[in-house]
Amino acid sequence: MSEPGSTPEGAAHGASERSTRGRSVVATLRQLWLGLSTYRLYPENPNRPGFAPAVERVALAANEALATGPVDVEVRGDRIVWEGEPLPQDDALDRLARACFERRVERLTVLSVPDAADLERLYEVLSRPAPDLEEAGGAEAALRDSGVASVSLSPIGPGPVEEADHVPEELVSTPLDERLDADVLASELMVEDLGGTPQDQAETLLRRLRHVLGDTSTAVGSRIDTHAAIHDLMGDLPDDVRRSFVELLVDRVAQDPVAERLIGTMSNADLTRALVDIGRSGRRDPVELARHLAVAGARHLDIIDLTKALAAGHEDAGTIIAGLEQLGIDVDRIDEAPGGGSVLEVLAGYLRDTENDDVRAVQAAVHASAEETRGLQAMALADYLALETDVERAGEALGIWADELRDALRRRDERAVHSLLQPVREALLGTGEERPALFRTYVRRVLEEGVVVDAVIADAADEEPRLASLLEPFGEEGVEALLDLVSDEEDRGRRALLLGALRRIVPGHPKLVAARLSDERWYVVRNAVSLLGSAGDPSALPRIAEVARHPSPEVRQEVPAALAAAGGAAAVPDLVGLALGPDEEVRRPAVSALGSLVGPEALEALGEVALRSADRALRLQALDELAGRAEGREVLRRLRSGGPGGRLPWRLRRYAGRLLSSGRGR
């Protein structure tokens, strides 16, 4: 008998199960990062907007992933490894890995579905500075001491998790106080005994590191806090030896697993600066070294552009001067960068790929700016976009802009939204086909569901609602985003809030709403009818009237009120037609809509319905509407006594007489 999985069918089934399991692991990790992002927006606020939905999404993803066992992954630099293989490149996963790596966390394990309290404590740990965590005994101890049992953070070294996907290599118990620092590592490597040329010393150092890192039989090699210790050790090496060592690692990265691992311990910022340092010594072209790393698969292609920029001097993110220079970019030297390259492409690389300190420096330059400074930044970005001919590079710049705009929307900062949005809109719209499409793509990223829903929730609790004024600068894109959200929103309260915001925005965009009248979903058409009516545009009357033939009664019943709101007196002929028409679903709403209008046209129309309708209940309703209005009572008297238009039947005349005598409607 063949063993399970030994047949082609078994192998295919196993691969399918692993793929499904992998997707659930990725989904869980991605939701963990999104929850952390939400937490970091309002770290001191226990009722932070959007956190409860984030907790729910984490629970849903984790529940599915945990059905087949704990989620157990390794963190290696800015990558996450599951079952011995790196997970696919994903911005959320990379950021989660970086948040762990910066705090010396090399393993993340989800053992059970974390609740809101567990996630809050986990995110608090992953938001604390690394030195604070070290003083608290490390991330593992800090999380454990807070009472969290559903998730664990640890350096490589704790025992395997029962039923875990994968037991990492080098997995042995590692008490925190036994970790070796750079000095101990230097002693183990006998750094002081290195001799010969810098190249010889680099060869010797790599050979000794290979022995130490590969020797799992001794406590020393298995207890090294690899990333931090090697990082510190390299910083302590003499300049020539350090350059030779980095150069050797780059040359060997494709063939030597240890060289690949050591390169992996370096952040993009450290690695780029090391390459540029080699270039400035005249030894090698740093861009060629970066290209070698990219070709070998040890780094993404953006390491090349980042190296070009740093080699050209675009490094100081703390310089605060006008325009793009506020972000530490020497715009006068753009053309000097080897091989060209976009300044904002470099900035995108920083925000995406550099270590925590670099990200904080760039963000500080952006977030700490005054309102006038932010406007200058946006105008400088608009000028750049107007000149940038490479759509891909423009897209990278827009990615940074979108992050800023999204943050402003979360803060509900109307001025920031306007100052960031308007210059870029003017630079990209009306300039061919590609750029408007690019603008719309990134605006829709800003207006993602979580951001807009959070703004809706916050707006509901605000005495002075601002959602409409926040979204109005987005123009058609803002209307489309809200329409999509209304279409998919199941919560009635949120849907009402979204519709309220749309009613204040759609008067300037009736065509966008009218386009939704052809949607196959009846509730989308119903919302569109209501919104078209609230726009108050008489030109929309023909389109609204057409919807009176819609197969859904819920849609048809919405038409009369929309006609009245859109056209006022101009809607009277359509409303009379509906009131006297064959559709019982819209007759009463049509009479109610006529009763909501002011002016003689509506009163005469109610009289016509009272005279001509074959539906007795509808005639009574029309008489009630007339009796409730001072001007309508005169029409009521005429209908009772007879006149040019005709006279009511006997029973209806008696009813009209009672209405006139009582002074009120039925």
Image (spheres, rainbow, N blue to C red):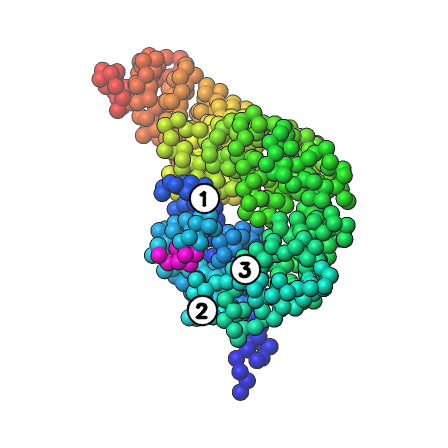
Q: Please report contact status of discs 1 and 2: CB closer than 8 Å, yes or no.
A: no
- Pointer 3: residues within 10 angstroms few (<14), some, or many (20+)? some
Question: Between tags 3 and 2, which lies in front?
Answer: 3
140 drawn magenta = yes
Q: Quadrant of residue 620?
A: top left
Residue drawn at x 65%, y 41% as measured from the top left: 315
Residue 524, labelled with which disc? Answer: none
Question: Which mark sits nearer the N-terminus, 3 or 1?
Answer: 1
Q: Residue at x 48, y 63 (%)?
A: 179
Indicate which disc, 1 or 2, sits on the residue closer to the N terminus. Answer: 1
| Of pointers 3 and 2, the one earlier in the residue sequence | 2
Report the Cα–Cα distance between label 1 and label 2: 32 Å
Q: Determine which residue is flagged by label 1.
A: 40
Q: Which residues are magenta?
A: 137-145
Which class describes the residues within 10 Å of circle 2: few (<14), some (14-19), or many (20+)?
A: some
Element type at mark 2:
loop
Image location of residue 291, percent across then percent down: 73, 54
Q: Residue beneath label 3, please? A: 183
Q: Nearer the viewer, residue 29 or 225?
A: 225
Secondary structure beneath dot 3 equals: helix
Q: Disc 3 vs disc 2: Cβ atoms closer than 8 Å?
A: no
Question: What type is the residue that disc 3 sits on?
Answer: Asp
Spot occupied by residue 653 in the image (x, y as percentages of width and height): 28, 19
Q: Amino acid at mark 2?
A: Ser
In what element is the residue under mark 1?
Answer: helix
Residue holding disc 2: 173
Which marked residue is nearer to the observer: mark 3 or mark 1? 3
In the picture as drawn, the residue positioned furthest to the bottom comes out as: 1
Work out whether residue 565 or residue 396 is closer to the camera in this orientation and state it: 396
Quadrant location of the C terminus?
top left
